[in-house]
Image (tube, grey):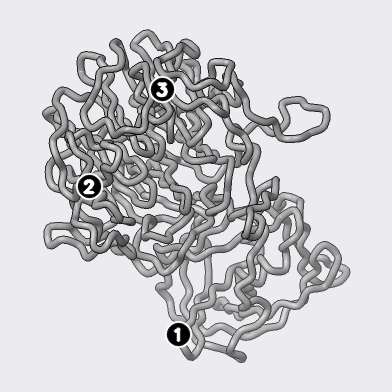
Amino acid sequence: MKPLKYSLVSLTALALFCALSLPVGAVESPGAFDLAAAGSSHILAVRADGSLWAWGANAMGQLGDGGTADRSAPVRIMDSVAAPAAGANHSLAVQADGSLWAWGNNASGQLGIGSRDNSAHTAPVKVMDHVAAAAAGASHSLAIQTDGSLWAWGANRSGQLGNGGTQDQLSPVKVMDSVAQVSAGEAHTLALKTDGSLWVWGANLAGQLGAPTQGRPDGDVIGDCLSPMKLMEGVAAVSACRSYSLALKTDGTLWAWGDNQYVQLGNGGSGNMAVMRPGASSTFCQTSPVQILDKVASMSAGGSSRACHALAVKEDGSLWGWGSNQYGQLGDSPLLSVSIPTRLDTGVRSAVAGGEFSLAFKEGSLMTWGSNSSGQLGVPAQGGGSSSGLPTPAPSDPPSPQRPDPYVQTVTAYARTQDILLDGETVTFQAYALKDAKGYETNYVKLRDAAFAINGSASQFQVEWSQTADTSILTSQPYTSNGSEMHTPYSGDRQGRAGEPTLLVNGREVKLSAILLTDDKGGGYTYFKLRDLGRVLGFNVGWDKEKGQVYIETGKSYTG
């Protein structure tokens, strides 16, 4: 995979640089926009003619329209814009001539105009020249000049400016050279250098720098880092939001680390450090990068103080999402959160995760969905509320392509009880068998039964439902029971359907032979060959001739 050519990243989103598509049913914002950036509750979008338009929240003048009233329809701000960046409540725009402009909140000096105040700056003010790209965090800003030098200004309490101190900077200060891309979280910063190395600095309370110990003898997580620190090599793009981070490597793998309060890391909700939160149960943080997907083309980290989610587009154009879905930012699903990457749609080139909403381009149109508290979806906000998911598709929107039913054959499944040696201990599975033309039987076991039995071992795996009727699996993660394991609401031989459904294993599509059985209420139960599960999920399955039993060895690779 080639490194991404364009690299502007805002507080909550990877800026878009090409036409996209999105889940059917999203609101279509008027006008043919080419690229966009999303803040906490506002959007900046650029048309093909270079004109910049804005809508959504505007209490601090972040729209740049001269006022402070929220807008639910795009308003034209300025011309000749090459790239926008949206922070929490401030905005940046790089013009075609390399000049950088800023407006909105300036309480921490994030506009870079040499002063700070609590007033709303409602019109663009020029900051500097010779700028190639910019990024906006919660209260700090960054710019890459055409010579590759990185400059930063604004809030610096946690060292997020990377200049070696903690004093806020009201004007741009130089941080480092040879920078290709930069992304700003709430109080930390990620910078990708031209050689593909990723550098991090700023706050690290939740492990968002991805460097847990850096050789400290006590093994504790390092605190705030005031200067750039190298984290990894071979990186193509980065995205930071709130207190978590994403990195896309040149091999197409996507890595995540940091705060996981809203399962926004996509690793099943786990982590290697527990965090106690006042008035709430403990949640997890991941202090070192973990891989969550492969074959990824672009990604975007989003979130607010009450919800975080992330989006990724794979090389095949499929759109994936995970994290909080409290405001419908992951689409039309009854789930309030999704802890592992779930496919949302196909035919997408890129997408942006905003504060509590999402956006993308589809066939030349900018599509939005999720929270609409300030009109950021491009339609009037109703009582300051938010959407419950994806709105009804507009008549002009083409229908989503329907996935063919993978279960193509009606079969008789024969009820069997199978004792299996699991790391030397006998576990009894309620299995179902299919017979071939010669009468030989092959047993199939329920996927969740296998996950339940193996849980706690080196080969444990998480299973979740996907919005596309696939089953999503994340290996090396603890299994969460749904109460259906090791028993079924039916017994005896049953009619079922056989086929090859698609499993999503760590984001990779895998087709396996399976049987689908349904109960009297229509609930579905999927059974797989145990050897297939071992081969795909990384545990050994064999036959003990002396005992006449199938055995499972966790922590050992499948040998066939």
Taking 39 as reference, is 367 above or below it?
Answer: below
Q: Please, what is the three-letter code of the amino acid marked with disc 1?
A: Gly
| Sequence-first disc among 3 and 2 | 2
Residue 403 in view of the camera: no
Residue 437 in picture, x, y percent from top left: 55, 78
**Which residue has dot 2 on it?**
70
**Which residue has dot 1 on it?**
522
Residue 373 in picture, x, y percent from top left: 30, 55
Q: Please, what is the three-letter code of the amino acid marked with disc 3?
A: Leu
User: Which sits in the foreground, 19 or 528?
Assistant: 19
Q: Quadrant of the N terminus?
A: top left
> The residue tagged with tag 3: helix, strand or loop?
strand
Q: Please, what is the three-letter code of the amino acid marked with disc 2?
A: Asp
User: Which sits in the foreground, 364 or 95?
Assistant: 95
- Which tag is nearer the camera, tag 1 or tag 2? 2
Q: Residue at horizontal 64%, vertical 58%?
A: 461
- Which tag is nearer the camera, tag 3 or tag 1? 3
**Which residue has dot 3 on it?**
142
Asked whether, in this view, residue 22 is left or right of residue 48, the answer is right
